[in-house]
Amino acid sequence: MGERRGFEKERRGLLATVLLLGMPVWAAEPAPEPEAEAWQPEVDAAAHPDVDTAAQPEEVAALTPELDVPTPAQVEVPPPEKQKEPKPKREEPLSEGGEGTAANDEETKGLRVVPFGRVFARVSADEREQYARSLSIASARVGLAASLSHVEAEVTADLSSKSLLKDAFVRVADGKKRLRLYGGQFKAPFLARELESAWRLPVIRRGLVADYLEDTHHLGGRRLGLMGEVSLKEAWKLKVSGGVFQGTKDEDTGIRASEDAALRATVRPFKVLTLGASTYFAQAFEGARTYALAGDAVLKLGGLEVTGEYVNGHLPTGPFAAQMGLASYTLPLGLVEGLALQPVAGAEMMQLLGPLKARGYAFVGGFNILYSEHFKAQLQAEHALRPGDQASGFEYSLQLATRF
């Protein structure tokens, strides 16, 4: 018995020694990480009642082909929608009231030549002529515009006019386009109605005031001259144009009068409002007995455009005053891209205040059909009493116009 107890005591002591020596080794070894379970698709018990959600992974994996789970490579990504690039805006020639057929910027390199033209075909019937129909080609104009980095030139001819040459001038600009110099034959900077391009003008004719001042008394219009222009965009887009122009030639004697002078300034205090003032002096260096002063305003609100102009001055017949107003609204039809309907209405009045007192007026209304920037049809009616008419009357006009 004593020997057996001694053997048991020795065995326990040996086991305790082994445990004490092995503890540092076990403490140094990191615990094994649990094995990551493979991803298995989730099974909707309602959609697949035969699948046991508590089954082993091998059993679930056997059913995965029936679930048709797409892989990332099988997912189709729709291509991004291509945004429509805006159509480049038509570059208007200088003679048409635009900024030129070339941007005339520093990126323009080399000579660029652009042809342009337009044709207006008109039919009218006037009450004062027993509604006799009149067919005419009101304008058949062709031209060339050439440009370099700081120089532009235009030549325009009207095949339907007795005076074939309309515009022939050169414009030189500085690097920042703040200073420009014109030389040649072009429109004098007088009367906003006269300076507006015939294509942009919503009425068929410029009106009795512009015709009376230019055609009868030779104030403004196209003339040989030299003109300077200053543009300051940071100052409400201020633009000032002034020049000296060739005087009018007397039809009886053939003698040309001394030089005329014209000046015009415009500002845009708001994006929708443009204000302007202009003046013209005939024989400016000999007393200027014939002259005119004008103020104008243009309001643009979306498709609505309203213009107004007041003119007064002195003619050989004495003092005069005139007022002009015009309103139009461009309504896109949506049936065809670029198609629009443009109702238009306008009124003019003129008073001769000298010894020979007289008055004239005109009321015009109608609508235009516009297509893109290359075609328009105008149907208008005018009731007017023009200078020299014995009585007022109606005139109905239809005009078709195209340009390139």
Image (cartoon, rainbow, N blue to C red):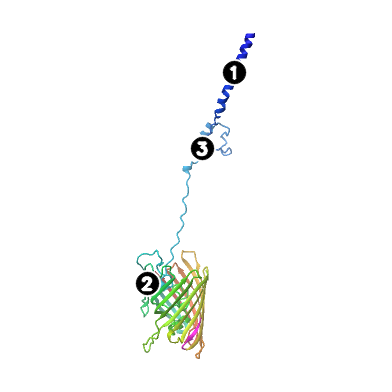
Within-10-Å neighbours for mark 3: few <14, some 14–19, many 20+: few
Classify 358 as above or below 75: below
Q: Which residue is mark 3?
A: 66
Element type at mark 3? helix
Q: Which residue is mark 1?
A: 15
Element type at mark 2? strand
Q: Nearer the viewer, mark 3 or mark 1?
A: 1
| Residue 197 at least partly seen | no
Residue 153's label in the rendered image is: 2
Within-10-Å neighbours for mark 1: few <14, some 14–19, many 20+: few
| Residue 402 at least partly seen | yes
Distance Cα–Cα, label 3 vs label 1: 59 Å
Q: Quadrant of the rendered structure where residue 99 is?
A: bottom left
Q: Which residues are magenta?
A: 311-316
Location of the N terminus (image quadrant): top right
Q: Is 32 part of what is drawn in magenta?
A: no
Mark 1 or mark 2, which has the lower sequence index? 1
Q: Residue furthest right?
A: 1
Within-10-Å neighbours for mark 2: few <14, some 14–19, many 20+: many
Mark 3 or mark 1, which has the lower sequence index? 1
Mark 2 or mark 3, which has the lower sequence index? 3
Image location of residue 184, percent across then percent down: 37, 77
Distance Cα–Cα, label 1 vs label 2: 114 Å
Classify 239 as above or below 59: below
Image location of residue 323, percent across then percent down: 52, 80
Element type at mark 1? helix
Image location of residue 379, percent across then percent down: 47, 74
